[in-house]
Amino acid sequence: MYEFLTNLIGNEVLAWIIIAALPLFVVILPYALVAIWLERKVSAHMQDRLGPMITGWHGWLQSFADVLKLLQKEDLVPAEADKKLFNIAPALVFTASYAAFAVIPFSSGFIGSGAEIGIFFILAVSSFAVAGILMGGWASNNKYSLIGAMRAVAQIISYEIPTALVVLSMVMITGTLSLEKISAMQTGYFWNWFIFGGPEWGLTKFLLIPFMLVGFLILYMSTLAEVNRTPFDIPEAESELVGGYHTEYSGMKFAMFFLAEYANMFAVSAIVSIIFFGGYQSPVGYLGDLFGVSWLIPFEQLFWFVAKGLFFVFVQMWLRWTLPRLRVDQLMNLCWKYLIPYSIANLIIIGLISLI
Amino acid sequence: MNLYDLIFYLFAAVTLLSAAVVVSSKNIIYSAFSLVLTFFGVAGLYILLGADFIGVVQILVYVGGIMILLLFGVMLTNKITSVDIRTGTVNVLPSAIAIGVFMGLVTSIMIWTKWVSLPTETPLTTTNELGKLLITEYVLIFELLAILLLVALIGAASIARRDKE
């Protein structure tokens, strides 16, 4: 991709800039528009309603109408707020969630950066989002914002531990931190995915399956908590905190928080699908191989990657409209008394199995 | 000046400017957030030197961990109890002397050391080599640090629980 662009434009700096900007315009923004519409339709149908029906076919233009509305809104800054930090916070939160896309391989032909430290980089930059949320919550000078921000920080910091432990156990098996290599390992058919014990045949593959399942459940739950989705959405619990850390934000600044949330949802779904479900690998082989057209394969891979990502985003929405919200103490109990001990045990067992 | 020089000066400027804000700002919250930026700049410099793992660890440990703890402390004192905490300037003379001596020491070390620069290839990744070194050559230091951290963890938990009895 990069060589292709360098040849096309003849300037490596410009090629880098295009590579860096591409995920935003090609993936995140259209995805966010679709996902916001999807969330409304999913929630509506789960509650036996219709949802938006007026704008376009089954209301598919509703998100565009929302964007137009948000663009026209007055930019309100509370008089008592800390104006500098209040304005920086949404940008910081969005930057953090956008930075994670740099190392996510969308297909074998397109990855922002093939850096070796891939997954570790994502774990690190996600901590900037915490700083942004805390900044916004504090600068708003509103008790609901501050409580929401404090809860968000406590929750995200706590749930980073089980996430990191599950990722560590997978790094032990794969021997690499690069998401590109982890995806490339699971090539072939769906039984080569790590949820089914990985690409190597033998006793270890079948021994690994139950622990992979446990690892997947822990990773999915803890990443769900890290992006503040129900049942772990106490930082923005509407019934308790008005809007949580973004209560005071309006117009485009609110839209940036919103966009960051949806971008994060896709990012964590992508990570789960890369680590356990083969990333961009097709479950049933490629049409490009069948017909001998090799340029088709990266596009097919992009299709499978987006399909898997969107499936897990859909599961997140499904959970949101099915499960009730946890209390703060239940949330911390779940993390510290169940997820972390289980993930440590899982880490040790997977380590022992991989020694066989 | 090539692109890498430009990126280096960018990160160096970020580090220095934000560090200046950290020490000069009257508002302790601004100082704390500028410290995040300082650590970010230093991490950028590490990565520019080819130490990708160290750079990311820098972000993960300092920005993620210490900053959040610092901010918790700051918020609990500053905004919620509405006690106005301002950072002032005290003990100007002793600190000026100490800083002067320290700067002199660092500069003299910098000048008198015979720096060896070997034209080696930039390694693609440092993670594997670091891991190997940590559990072979530096295994004693590694284990001692692990025990130290465990002691700190247990100590913190036992201090936090003492009041209840």
Image (tube, rainbow, N blue to C red):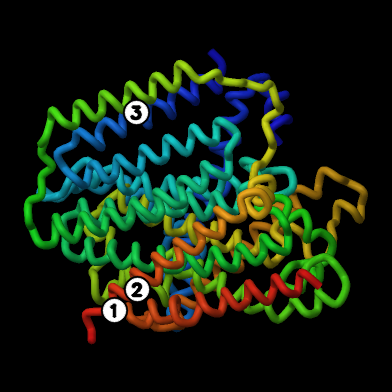
Residue A218 picture location, percent across and down: 56, 75
* Quarter residue A272 falls in: bottom right
Q: Earlier in the sequence, mark 1 or mark 3?
A: 3
Q: Which residue is mark 2?
A: B157
A218 w.r.t. A140: above or below: below
> In this figure, which residue is indicated by the disc labeled 3?
B16
The answer for how far apart the CA atoms under marks 2 and 1 are is 6 Å
- Alpha-carbon distance for marks 2 and 3? 37 Å
Instruction: Read off the residue under disc 1.
Output: B161
- Asked if badges 2 and 1 are on one and the same chain, I answer yes
Say left or right for A3 vs A155: right
- Please, what is the three-letter code of the amino acid marked with disc 2? Ala
Q: Earlier in the sequence, mark 2 or mark 3?
A: 3
| Figure check: A40 above or below A115 | below
**Residue at point 67%, 41% (across, down):** B125
Q: Position of residue B65 (x, y in %)?
A: 39, 56
Name the outermost residue toward the top: B1
